[in-house]
Image: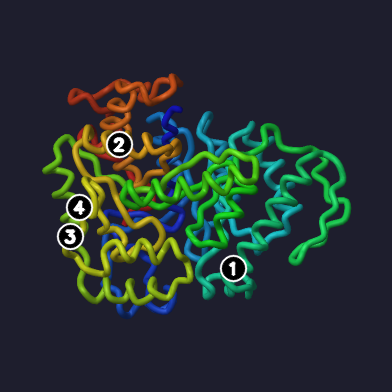
Amino acid sequence: MSVHLHWFLPTGGDGRTLVDRHAYTDGGIRRDRITPVSGVRAPDIEYLAQIAKAAEQLGFEAVLTPTGTWCEDAWLTTVALTQVTERLKFLVAFRPGVVSPVLAAQMAATYQRISRGRLLLNVVTGGDSTEQKRFGDHLGHDRRYARTDEFLQIVRGVWGGRPFDFQGEHYQVEGGLTALPPDPLPQIFFGGSSAAAGPVAARNVDVYLTWGEPPEEVKKKIDWIRGLAEKEGRTVRFGIRLHTISRDSSKEAWATAGRLLDDLDPETVAAAQQALGKSESVGQQRMLALHGGSRDRLEISPNLWAGVGLVRGGAGTALVGSHAEVADRIEEYHSLGIEHFILSGYPHLEEAYWFGEGVRPELAARGLLDAGPAPLDGVPAANGRPASAPGGAPLLIAGGR
């Protein structure tokens, strides 16, 4: 079982700080309680293309693209980026409650043909009723997962190439059909920590995703989903979503984490925690519990830092340390059964290079990576990094401000 490395595409904006242009007060509509932020980069297509190309050059297999109010549309953005990349896959996040399952199956099939088979799907059921209602979805938490269950059954059914009928509580389909099924079928990624989410994963998905909790908690999740899948006669693979701060020395990495923390004033943290505390997502509540809104004892497990979750929803932890230490932690998670590592860092362009040049060779030396196209085809600078990387010639950042 090899490690699959993926990066993140910040379609909601990027920058040198954990606080971006999206405020948390009132769901991000009002910004009066958020400290003004400098160094924020707009998610224009030129900048996103830089990240995608860097991820491909550095040997990442795919990039995850988020979904939500504050992001560019994941389908449209990534299909554009398929035209400026060659091998990179795109893990497209979408909410099943706001699009027809037959239409989603058709969109996936078209995407596979345009991209020559580079689509992966990340199904996001949604844990915030306020966000769901913006898109016209008024179902409660558990009913959303029941609908996702039906949605995925229909998607797989219509990918069969023959008319497919379905009668459920949320969907009724007669003769559903994808005339030209996708080839290959996109792998389906899915996450959810609630009792309602587990059976959906066991019955329908290829890869179950968890956010970056300490290894002992991740093992409990793996055992839970694996047991449910066995009862369904299925096998599910596992992935984890983490940020990274990897440097040539542990001291450098923790200094970077400290700088990110110094950018956060108490009012910003309080506003974020107040908004995030309203989430219905069990996974989000587990993230919040890791730090309790406090800056004290943020290293919740060796090299696992919960500082990101003070102001960011979703994945709230980062692997922090030297390249070897970060590789140690990845190897530890891998030993539990994690295959897919979906990583990110601030800013995403520079951190992709730090990880790709520092940690990836460590993992390769340990025999954890499949042999593939060699990353970093360019001529290295005198310090061993490509001229486009941090520490080489200056980076040219489109859309930075």
The Cα atoms of the two marked residues, 1 and 4, are separated by 36 Å
Against 161, residue 155 (above or below) is below
Tell me the crowding category of disc 3: few under 14, some 14 to 19, or many 20 or more residues within 10 angstroms, Cα based: few
Quarter of the figure that contains the C terminus = bottom left
Q: Nearer the viewer, mark 3 or mark 4?
A: 3
Residue that appears at 21% across and 36% down? 325
Among the two numbered marks 2 and 4 on one chain, the one whose residue lies closer to the N terminus: 4
Against 221, residue 20 (above or below) is below
The Cα atoms of the two marked residues, 3 and 2, are separated by 25 Å
Q: Amino acid at mark 4?
A: Ala
The Cα atoms of the two marked residues, 3 and 1, are separated by 34 Å
Say which residue label 3 marks.
Answer: 297
Give the number of the disc on residue 125: none
Say which residue label 4 marks.
Answer: 257
Tell me the crowding category of disc 1: few under 14, some 14 to 19, or many 20 or more residues within 10 angstroms, Cα based: some
Task: Please indicate whether residue 183 sits to the left or right of residue 258 in the image.
Answer: right
Among the two numbered marks 3 and 4 on one chain, the one whose residue lies closer to the N terminus: 4
The reply to whether callout 3 and callout 2 are in contact (CB within 8 Å) is no
Q: What SS does tag 3 mark? A: loop
Task: Please indicate whether residue 117 sits to the left or right of residue 303 in the image.
Answer: right
Q: Is residue 135 visible?
A: yes
Q: What SS does tag 2 mark? A: helix
Say which residue label 1 marks.
Answer: 142
Tell me the crowding category of disc 4: few under 14, some 14 to 19, or many 20 or more residues within 10 angstroms, Cα based: many
The Cα atoms of the two marked residues, 2 and 4, are separated by 15 Å
The Cα atoms of the two marked residues, 2 and 1, are separated by 38 Å
Tell me the crowding category of disc 2: few under 14, some 14 to 19, or many 20 or more residues within 10 angstroms, Cα based: many
Among the two numbered marks 3 and 1 on one chain, the one whose residue lies closer to the N terminus: 1
Please provide percent x and percent y for residue 57. 41, 29
Among the two numbered marks 1 and 4 on one chain, the one whose residue lies closer to the N terminus: 1
Say which residue label 2 marks.
Answer: 355
